[in-house]
Amino acid sequence: MTNPLRAVRGMNDLLPADAPLWQCFEGILRAWLKAYGYREMRTPILEHTGLFKRAIGEVTDIVEKEMYTFVDELNGESMTLRPEGTASCVRAVIEHNLLFDGGKRLWYAGPMFRHERPQKGRYRQFHQFGIEALGYAGPDLDIEHLLMTARLWKLLGLADCIHLELNSLGGAESRARHREKLIAYFQAHEALLDEDAKRRLHSNPLRILDTKNPAMRELVEAAPRLMDELDETALAHFDAVKAGLEAAGIAYTINPRLVRGLDYYNYTVFEWVTDRLGAQGTVCAGGRYDGLVQQLGGKAAPACGYAMGVERLLALMVEVGVAPPADVPDVYLVNVGEAASRFAQHAGETLRDAGFNVVLHGGGGSFKSQMKKADACGARYAMIIGDDEALAGEVTIKPLRGEGEQQRVALGAAAEFLKG
RNA sequence: GUGGUGGUAGCUCAAUUGGUAGAGUCCCAGAUUGUGAUUCUGGCUGUUGUGGGUUCGAGUCCCAUCCAUCACCCCA
């Protein structure tokens, strides 16, 4: 507490007590990804600043005020800690020409960095897990992504507290047209706008639709709707996605105000949301971004994907009482005396050869104190070795959970005894 | 980045109108000199987030700062 050396604000240590939850989550994730044929990709945490400016958009909040950008003093380059994963993923796909033989299903996971004010479910270093399917144009991949996320919520025990919100942004032309109409509309009613709305009128007029100011409700409800601007292709795509969801029995709500904070999205956008985490309730979000590959210099290729906030999902698991399996050894090796200590190392290796997880007591101490540790660690068995046993090449095995008397057996027979 | 609330032992929390900083838990030792979760006994633990100020005297009041938290904002 008095130590001036503290972790950087908004950046958290993962302590051993929390590790099992993360591992449990990651284990479920890996099996689930395999079931859908997605393959892992790892990219650097640091990228040239220009990548994010081009991918995410110069006027987004992320790029304007949340990026950890600094100059590498050794060569004068502007570097940025990645604020999200898609840009790096697409960059790597282009750089290594991964689409040369067709579409790719990819996933990544790791820390992301955004300089925001920390809050529950919002940290400056946080972890995202994400998926990108590149080179696929049809709505089939959009549907696959929605189905697979729905399956994941079931696997995590969260299906009852997350719901899906869906929208279509249409193509770039529809959006540009809508944006112009929106600005014109709000300008015509400028007297009715609050301060916030005036500020956003030209920077981000879509956000005005999201206002919580009741005085502006009427104005906003009568505003031009993006849905009315969608062309036939976009509508067909959207309809197909909705049909796919209905066929799979996945409930959703259309949210016409659902907008993304990153410029690269088009067509389908979605968010999985919970009301159990307060203000940071979006647990997974994504959609289609058909223009990004070309925008970053690659050969034009359609794409869609999504990202999940790991901390938020874990918080939700804790909230609903999902408990990871306890992380306990099979055997705790109690050893008192010099000969016993040497023999215990040998006994530990022998048991590990047989596939057991063994914790060797370290640091000496009485039998009593060592037995206390054995119990506290949750091991099923204590294996007790004194100089007696060491001399005889034997071990005393005491069951710590449930029934059973302790027994003294030859070390060679110990593994057999533990299995039986 | 803006506003509100809060910070006392490793953890969970007490402390009257400003008057010696406490309990449970954890940990250690003993009761049983080779045996754990119970019980009993004893022991350890703090610059009261940090730095200033007011006061004879500050955990308590004031200011600043850091951190957490809630909301805004934003997003995963």
Image: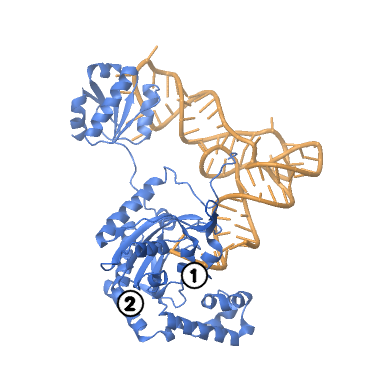
Q: CA distance from mark 1 to mark 2?
A: 29 Å
| Chain to which the residue tagged by mark 2 belongs | A
Colouring convention used in this rendered image of the protein: by chain
**Furthest residue in direction bottom, as rendered:** A188
**Is the residue at mark 1 from the same chain as the one at mark 2?**
yes
Which residue position holds label 2? Answer: A242
Q: Is residue A195 left or right of residue B39?
A: right
**In the image shown, does A297 or A194 lie closer to the viewer?**
A297
- The percent coordinates of residue A387 (x first, y second) are 30, 17
Q: Which chain is blue?
A: A
**In the image shown, does A209 or A398 lie closer to the viewer?**
A209
- Residue found at x 33% / y 26%: A334
Q: Is residue A61 above or below residue B63?
A: below
Query: Which class describes the residues within 10 Å of circle 2: few (<14), some (14-19), or many (20+)?
Result: many
Amino acid on which disc 1 is placed: Gly
Q: Quadrant of the C terminus of chain A?
A: top left
Corner quadrant of residue A352: top left
Q: Is residue A118 visible?
A: no
Q: Which chain is orange?
A: B
Which residue position holds label 1? Answer: A57
- The percent coordinates of residue A146 (x first, y second) are 33, 68
**In the image shown, does A378 or A289 lie closer to the viewer?**
A289
In primary-sequence order, the first of circles 1 and 2 is 1
Q: Secondary structure at mark 1?
A: loop
- Residue found at x 26% / y 58%: A34
Query: Which class describes the residues within 10 Å of circle 1: few (<14), some (14-19), or many (20+)?
Result: some
Give the foreground label among 1 and 2: 1
- Residue found at x 36% / y 22%: A367
- The percent coordinates of residue A190 (x first, y second) are 62, 84
